[in-house]
Amino acid sequence: MNRPLRALALCGMIAASLPVACTAQSPGVAELPVPSTAPPAMPMVSGLPDFTNLVQQVGPAVVNISAETAPRRAARGAMPDESQIPEFFRRFFGDEMPIPGVPRGPGGPQGRGGTSLGSGFLISDDGYVLTNHHVVEGADSITVKLSDRREFKATLVGSDQQSDVALLKIEGKGLPALRTGKSDQLKPGQWVVAIGSPFGLDHSVTAGIVSAVGRSNPYADQRYVPFIQTDVAINRGNSGGPLLNTKGEVVGINSQIFSNSGGYMGVSFAIPIDVAMNAVQQLRSTGKVSRGQLGVVVQEVTSDNARALGLPDSDGALVADVGAGSAADKAGIQRMDVIRAVNGKPVIASSDLPPLIGAMVPGSRAKVMVFRDGKLRELTVVLGELDEAVSSAASPPPGPGAAPAQPESTNALGLVARDLSSAERQRLDLKADEGVLLVHVMGLAAREAGLQPGDVILSIGRSSVGTAAAFNRQLAGVKPGQTVMLLVRRGAGTQFIAVTADAAAG
């Protein structure tokens, strides 16, 4: 053996005698993949924006608003304890947080009077100012302070609680004003900037990104506002201030926060400027905001609903009820229809429908695409006018009436119903031949779907039921594993509930 070979053999023996390092692969582990030869990915984000120039340009058009209220006599009755209020979307007043069931306003729930501080911005050089309805609600006098410390007494042109928009007017000419952008072009991930007066700190600037668009607010009566969600730091006093894109255009009005403490927690909400300017135009011309009304009660489409209806997915708004004589009724929309689009704009969730309809003026025509019996149908609807004064009073639960009947027989869903008395129908505002009362829910699937004794079944699918006998006849043909849509009235609410017959039921 020559010298080089002996050297190699010696090295091999030395290597074999060394301990195995803790990072060595154990036998049987696959070798590492060969590194990719593809060119490196280009960075998707380059650098961070500098908002200095934007703030210098738009800052003078942002104003501070003081809304003063004289003391008022406190309302009768005990005020709810704030500790009992769920921690949800808190509006940001200066000192007071509105409490459900208590009149809101700068004076606070106890009517002590005082001053509410908020923000706003000029939208024209002749002195029109935009802010939130809740900033100036109930105010006896409103003062607008500009960035150059000039102060003006403002006149309330009009205010709309549904959109939470208020339009003010101050006397002036050549005032700085903001440009409006297109809020419907916003996308999650875009940079946005807020300028306002949190905690009275004038012209504070915060920035962040759009977290989501088209958010509904289940905790306030603002069904017609598809909110912009951001992570911009917003606190009390920011309310009414502008949300700006990187062009310095207003895309929203900062309105609400989601908070456990009443302060910034990374979730804030703004009213889209397109919605706000629609309200502004009507407030300037008529002093109020009118909205279109379809006249339906809708609910979400669940996977069970979709399967029962033969839908390809869970998109749309399921029609649970149609108002008699409403625009929807006249156009032929029926219970159990699924509204999939309005004027070509898709309806993904039931909360998408009110903003689409509310943005149109009463009397306008809308093309409504509905899914019915496995087919899409386009219906033309002439919208009515939303009556804000009309509210659906809560219907009391059915009274005891006659003693509940004991179960004599069951159907495929394991449900036992009895006829409603005429007094019960009158109390529930039902027709003479409408509805049966559930007295027993024996089927496991029906219980899991949420049915309970005391519910009133109005229809099975599209077929109304008015007697227990008719109810049982319609369920007689249901086979185990088949899904049935039941229209259920509970209290003031009406909705479809999908129930799949138990495999062992009979």
Image: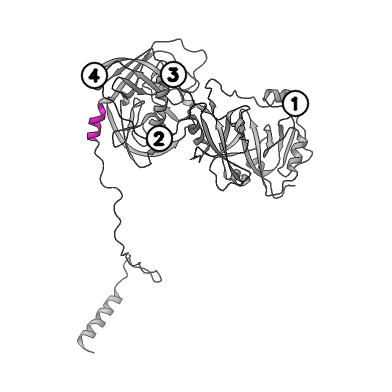
Residue type at mark 1? Ser
**Do the numbered discs 3 and 4 sit on residues whose CB atoms are within 8 Å?**
no
Instruction: Count residues near mark 4 (Cα–Cα under 10 Å), then give few for <14, some for 14-19, many for 20+.
Output: few
Residue 97, percent from left and from top: 42, 23
Residue 263 in sight: no
Q: Which residue is mark 1?
A: 421
Residue 115, percent from left and from top: 35, 16
Of the two numbered discs 1 and 2 on the same chain, state the one appearing first in sequence. Answer: 2
Instruction: Count residues near mark 1 (Cα–Cα under 10 Å), then give few for <14, some for 14-19, many for 20+.
Output: some
- Where on the picture, by quarter, is residue 112? top left
Return the residue nearer the eye: 200 or 228: 228
Q: Which residues are magenta?
A: 45-59
Q: Which residue is mark 4?
A: 149
The residues bearing labels 3 and 2 have C-alpha atoms spaced at a distance of 27 Å
Residue type at mark 3? Thr
Of the two numbered discs 2 and 4 on the same chain, state the one appearing first in sequence. Answer: 4
Q: Which residue is mark 2?
A: 228
- Where on the picture, by quarter, is residue 423? top right
Q: Which residue is mark 3?
A: 286
- Is residue 310 rendered magenta in the image? no
Residue type at mark 4? Arg
The residues bearing labels 3 and 4 have C-alpha atoms spaced at a distance of 32 Å
